[in-house]
Image (cartoon, rainbow, N blue to C red):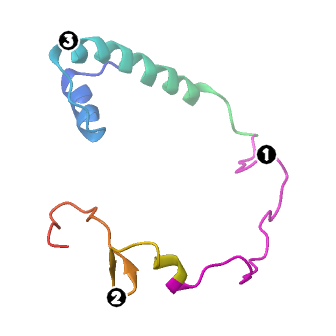
Amino acid sequence: MVKLTKEDVLHVAKLAKLDLVEAEVERFTPQLSNVINHFSELSEVDTVDTEPTSQTTGLENVYREDKVTVEGSLSAEEAISGSDKIHNGYFKVKAILEGRTDK
């Protein structure tokens, strides 16, 4: 039987980018221990004669061939014609990466 510590729960919370208050840590410690114990029960299942499987539907290669058509498509000039925020032929948008505020 697994019994997690307060530090274990805080580590998991950090990985999940969760800020927990002390009351939440106290409440989640036994709950998370119970979840892990339920998963550990799976190790008791006899799977010696069970073949591994990655999917169960029997479907094979459900992809379709890509076909490019120009009908109904916009040219690059038509696509950017509705915006005044253009730079070198591309839409200009706010930066999405931290620390990159120069663009």
- Dot 2, crowdedness within 10 Å: few (<14), some or many (≥20)? few
Q: CA distance from mark 2 to mark 1?
A: 49 Å
Position of residue 50 relative to residue 59, above or below, is above
Q: Amino acid at mark 3?
A: Ala
Q: Which residues are magenta?
A: 50-77
Q: Amino acid at mark 2?
A: Asn
- Name which residue lies at 37% across and 15% down: 31
Say which label, 2 or 1, has the lower sequence index. Answer: 1
Say which label, 3 or 1, has the lower sequence index. Answer: 3
Q: Nearer the viewer, mark 3 or mark 1?
A: 3
- Name which residue lies at 74% across and 49% down: 55
Q: Is residue 90 magenta?
A: no
- Name which residue lies at 29% across and 34% down: 12
Position of residue 100 relative to residue 1, above or below, is below
Q: Is residue 70 magenta?
A: yes
Residue 15 seen: yes
Quadrant, the N terminus: top left
Of the pair 92 and 22, the residue shown nearer to us: 92
> On the image, numbered disc 3 is attached to which residue?
23
> On the image, numbered disc 2 is attached to which residue?
88
Q: Element at badge 1?
A: loop
Q: Main secondary structure of the magenta part?
A: loop
Q: Position of residue 6 (x, y in %)?
A: 20, 21
